[in-house]
Image: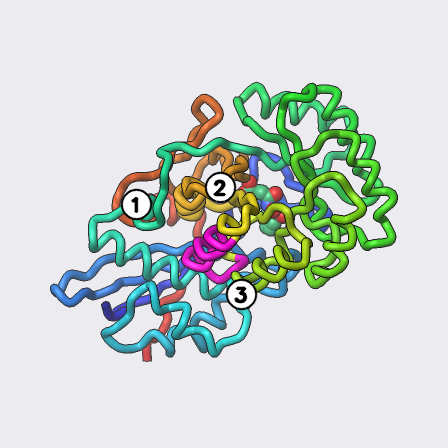
Amino acid sequence: MQLRGVRLHWLKLPLVRPFTTSFKVQTEREALLVEVAAEFDDGRTVTGWGECVALPDPSYSPEYADSCAVVIERFLLPRLRGDDVIAETVGHRLHRVKGNRMAKAALEMAVLDAQLRHAGRSFASYAGAVVDRVPSGVSVGIHDSVGELLDAVSGYLAEGYVRIKLKIQPGFDIEPVRAVRKLIGDDVPLQVDANAAYTLVDAPHLRRLDEFGLLLIEQPLGDEDMRQHAALARQMATPMCLDESIDSAEAAADAIALGAAAVINIKAGRVGGYLEAIRIHDIARANGIAVWCGGMLETGVGRAANAALAALPGFTLPGDISASDRFYREDITEPFVIDDGHIAVPQTPGISAAPDPDRLAACRVAVRDLPLG
Ligand code: NPG
């Protein structure tokens, strides 16, 4: 295929309620979508959509939405000139540009979406999905009081979510987790996510989480602290899960070899795209390491991709794939709904439904056509 047009859309979607993590309070999602027009050998031109998951600031990772837009325009697109573009070689063509994985992921996703739409094939079938619905977990932010947290958790359980993930940080960890475990009983799967808020000297404190029978503790230490995660893992009974530290298949292989990860949270944006995400799934599965699909408050475009990814056989733990209304009153696609604790895996050609043009226009704050050179 040949790229004939690339358009960036900056969106702002209000959240139904603030979402607080150890690194940020989010009250709206600023999303960046990549739309490509791809012309195929048969003369057909097909539109593809990608979602860039970078936040508006470098708080979760070094990238941020505007840095991604610049990188896509100045450094990535020039490498996708010519009539021989296929999704499977996008990663290789972009390899000389270091890092900037969320930017690369969004562009590769748009190309893959166009390619699959052209072929009339769903992403689920392409990726090797083995189920047509995936269990839905919910990520619950830090609250001002334990009482408010318990109300939120009760509400999500009533909606049918099958697994609860609690955001924790120093000062909001042992007691909130104890209270939630007491509320939900021993049978509801519960896990915690620290988003790199602790250091290894906190090991004795973190070990107190062991008594709550957690599925896992996610990224307690810094992004670069692979060795220290391995050391912490040896001191805790709760299985160690890495998120921020795993930015590639190589990093996943290292984490497994070091004993730093008994579980891996896979987020395609963080690792440079859905194809790398599939490779990490494959490596983890071959090593007997469980994976689950993380979320970054995606719109319906990215949520569709995550639901399909999570349908691969190694995704043995529920992902952060909630219904659209966990974050948004109105999505830009048909909303994903929770049904009996599950989210349906899209089966239509391409990765996601195209955004609804009216909804897109309603929440768009900027749009830019990129020169193709
Ligand atoms: O369900 O999409 C979701 C949110 C899941 O907690 C969630 N995401 O650290 O994993 C995380 C966190 C996050 C959100 C990280 C946005 C970065 C940006």
Question: Local crowd at mark 1 within 10 Å, few (<14), some, or many (≥20)?
Answer: some
Between 112 and 75, the residue placed more toward the observer is: 112
Chosen colour scheme:
rainbow
- Nearest the eye: 361 or 312: 312
Residue at 31% x, 62% y: name it.
36
Residue drawn at (73%, 47%) of the image: 22
For label 2, being within 8 Å of ligand 1 is answered no
Q: Is residue 274 magenta?
A: yes
Q: From the Cβ of disc 1, is ligand 1 less than 8 Å away?
A: no
- Residue 365 in view here: no
The residue under label 3 is 66
Residue range in magenta is 270-283
How much space separates mark 3 and mark 1, taking CA atoms? 33 Å
Q: Are marks 1 and 2 in contact (CB under 8 Å)?
A: no
Badge 2, how many Cα within 10 Å: few under 14, some, many 20+?
A: many
Q: Are marks 3 and 1 in contact (CB under 8 Å)?
A: no
Label 2 residue SS: loop
Mark 2: amino acid: Phe
Magenta segment: does it hold 81? no
- Residue that mark 1 sits on: 125
From the top left corner, tell me how far across and down residue 105 is, in percent.
Answer: 45, 61
Can you identify the residue that label 2 sits on? 315
Give the secondary structure at mark 1: helix
Q: Which of the two labelled residues, at mark 3 and mark 2, occupies the earlier sequence position?
A: 3
Mark 3 to mark 2: distance in Å? Answer: 32 Å
Residue 198 percent location from the top left of the image: 79, 51
At 53% from the left and 68% from the top, the residue drawn is: 100
